[in-house]
Image (cartoon, grey):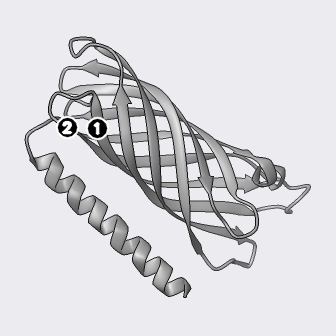
Amino acid sequence: MKRIVRSAAVLGMVTLATVATAQAQAPGRASFHVAGGVTLPMGDFGDAFSMGWQGLGGVSFGLGGLPFAIRVDGFYGQNGGDEDVTGPDVKAKFFGGMAGGQFGFGSAASSVKPYILGQVGMVNSKVSFPGGSTDGETDFAFGGGAGINFGLGSMGAFVEGQFVSVQTEGSASNYLVARFGINFGGGM
């Protein structure tokens, strides 16, 4: 059953990436972005793990003259274990992809544009420890956040905060992520 769910998740992400690529090549504003940031675990996940890091890359593409863009992201990140709870050298690792919408505020001529973001996707999580690791588990995830784009012609920068909830077996792994990134190709 898990293989079927994983296969469906992979097929869904490939379909989203294909649609994103096709739309990015269609008329409209497409941009590619890379970002890095810190993750702050919350709830039960926060009880066992400490602050970590995350790297992200993706594509977003505008829909004509609308202040809305479709955004597809892939990411990898780690959080170290709380030594008092998990022991030394324990790490939670997350690898996944999310897709959704980004709605921008402000005029098209403005170089500073706030936005809100909502996404869903699939995330593979694994815990590594000295001498081994758990089997990876792929689960549904969702997130929402806000940020600010700083346009600089064909390049730009952004800062954003996002809440992410990975629906792991038992209780969800929830965290906040604060990112700084660069847009190539304009941005929204």
Rendered view: 132 above or below 167: below
Classify 10 Å Cα crowding around label 2: few (below 14), some (14-19), many (20 and above): some
The x, y position of residue 12, in whole percent, is 35, 68
Rendered view: 94 above or below 63: below
**Disc 2: which residue:** 63
Using the image as rendered, state which of residue 85 and residue 17 is in the foreground: 17
Furthest-right residue in this view: 84
Using the image as rendered, state which of residue 101 and residue 158 is in the foreground: 101
Please, what is the three-letter code of the amino acid marked with disc 2? Leu
Pointers 1 and 2 in contact (C-beta within 8 Å): yes
Figure quadrant of residue 63: top left
Figure quadrant of residue 28: top left
| Residue drawn at the location 30% of the way across and 44% of the way down | 70
Nearer-N-terminus badge (1/2):
2
Please, what is the three-letter code of the amino acid marked with disc 1? Ala
| Residue drawn at the location 36% of the way across and 65% of the way down | 13
**Disc 1: which residue:** 69
Image quarter (top left, top right, bottom left or bottom right) of the N terminus? bottom right
| Residue drawn at the location 16% of the way across and 50% of the way down | 23
Rendered view: 32 above or below 130: above
Secondary structure of the residue carrying tag 1 is strand
Direction from residue 92 to residue 170 in the image, left or right: right
Using the image as rendered, state which of residue 74 and residue 120 is in the foreground: 120
The x, y position of residue 156, in whole percent, is 29, 25
Figure quadrant of residue 45: bottom right
The x, y position of residue 42, in whole percent, is 74, 45
Image quarter (top left, top right, bottom left or bottom right) of the C terminus? top left
